Amino acid sequence: MTAITLRPLAATDSIEALTALLHASYASLAAQGWNFTAVNQSVQTTRERVEAGQAFVALSASGELVGTVTIAPPKRPDGRYLGDPVPDCYTQPDTAILAQLAVHPSCRGQGVAERLMDLAEDWAHAQGYAHVALDTAVPAEALRRRYERRGYARIGDVQWAGKTYRSVLMRKALGPTAASTEAHP
């Protein structure tokens, strides 16, 4: 396994490189006919999404960006999410929103996505959130199973404007972090 370092997105990190990573990571989903936002989102959309919360990145030993995830506070009930009305589960004060989970195809199968999700969930827990919510394509069975194995349960669905698929909304209750479990046996 290649050495991978995880850390918060820094102001000096390239949003252009992050956008290119998202495009490369989501290309296999696009090939299945699913037009996830990250398939072809603009640099400006990437910037807006990471600025809305806390982004984390995974770097290879050579410093190349190979993974990312963004975790954000709840949306305003009267606001918009990527141009659409906000689903109720994304407006709950105790719920953070996970988005833009991506791992470069050359680094898949090394546990990078799991480590990124751990980091995002730990951040949400440390900020006082009791839950994390996300959405993914209903036909993306492998992604849904991944989230279910992590404790996410289906709580609804939504049809985002312009998408070629319906999305499932999922939420997970956050328990103690690994660090807090060790500190308080």
Image (cartoon, rainbow, N blue to C red):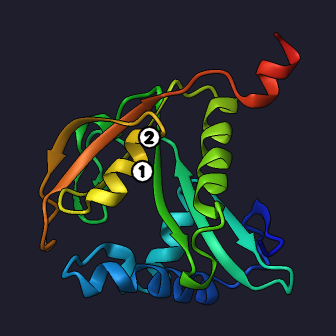
Q: In the image, what residue occupies the spot 82% across and 10% down?
A: 185
In the image, residue 112 lies at what x, y percent? 65, 63
Q: Quadrant of residue 149?
A: top left
In the image, residue 147 lies at what x, y percent? 41, 46
- Camera-side residue of 137 and 144: 144
Q: Is residue 151 left or right of residue 12?
A: left
> Label 1 near label 2: C-beta < 8 Å?
yes
Q: Is residue 185 left or right of residue 67?
A: right
Q: Is residue 60 left or right of residue 116?
A: right
Amino acid type for the residue under numbered disc 2: Arg
Q: Which residue was labeled with disc 1?
A: 146
Amino acid type for the residue under numbered disc 1: Arg
Report the number of discs.
2
Q: Which mark is residue 149?
A: 2
In the image, residue 8 lies at what x, y percent? 75, 60
Residue 7 makes an appearance in the image: yes
Q: In the image, what residue occupies the spot 35% across and 42% down?
A: 76
Q: In the image, what residue occupies the spot 59% across and 89% down?
A: 16
- Camera-side residue of 54 and 106: 106
* Above or below for 110 versus 177: below
